[in-house]
Image: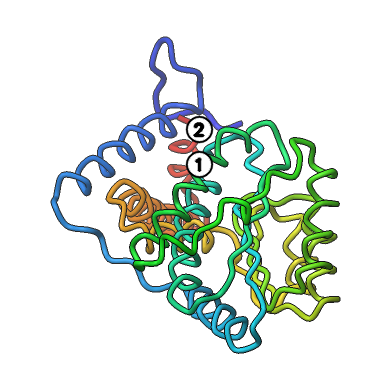
Amino acid sequence: MSSPLFTIPGIIQGRFLGLLLNVILVLLVIYYMREGRLPYMRRVAGLDAIEEAVGRSAEMGRPVVCSYGIAWDGFDYWTVAALAVLGYVARLCARTGTRLIVPTGGSDGSLIVRPVAVETVRTAYLLEGKEEEFDEKDLPFLSGQQYAYTGGYIGILQRARPGAVIMLGSHYSEAMNITETANAVGALTITTGCYASNLACLACASDYILIGEEGTAAGAYLSEDPAQRASFRAQDIYKWIALAFLILGLIAINAGSDFFVRLLAT
């Protein structure tokens, strides 16, 4: 390992730059939140696919099934983003008179997320002036166990024959079972890939897929939450910093300088 540019007592070698960047990230998020206007975010293409899916279901007279994931860790960033998109889907369904089914469960963490999901859907129907059409029975809690939840989810798909299945949030190994069944019943399938091992499989089994941070970006775009948008703006800045380090580092190495290597080791 290259020697660092300098060392600071009490900080492990190779950690100072990461610590500094984390502090800058926090300050950037606070700055954008206090600025009083929402940072610009482009519309994620997957949102157009969601509108298409709900419209298709309305035309076919079939329900929409939309889930926010198994919430393994409770309110993680995948789940928070999924709840924002769920509210959007619920408003579309209320507006078009389409039944919305939201399977919940899959982990112990889902127990604390479900009440928020119920209120999110209820509020969406209220905002569309159709609160009387909201039915909490359409948000069944299937199980706190992953594969018992999967079996219940598949059962709903086979019985309800939805026109669209929208899987948001953190779905893991159960995702393929669900998407294959969704395809079998003829549903238009939209998924989010929350970890790399699942992406290729979901891309093959889905009509549309939100890859990586597109899922969380969609939630931030719809929620218009200053904290979420500020964090994404800070991440974009970090990407440019990382790209600059990569290019300058390559130039420096080829010029015979190890400055950037030593900087990263600091």
Q: Position of residue 261 (x, y in %)?
A: 50, 41
- 94 left or right, relative to 79: left
Q: Which mark is residue 222?
A: none
- 211 left or right, relative to 22: right
Element marked by disc 2? loop
Labelled pair 2, 1 in contact (Cβ < 8 Å): yes
Q: Position of residue 219 (x, y in %)?
A: 45, 58
State the residue position of label 1: 261
Dividing the picture into quadrants, the one containing residue 204 is bottom right
Viewport quadrant of the N terminus: top right
Q: Position of residue 143 (x, y in %)?
A: 76, 39
Q: Given the current orientation, which residue lies at the most extreme bottom position?
A: 59
State the residue position of label 2: 265
Element marked by disc 1? helix
Nearest to the observer: residue 149 or residue 21 = 149
Nearest to the observer: residue 119 or residue 1 = 119
Tag 2: amino acid: Ala
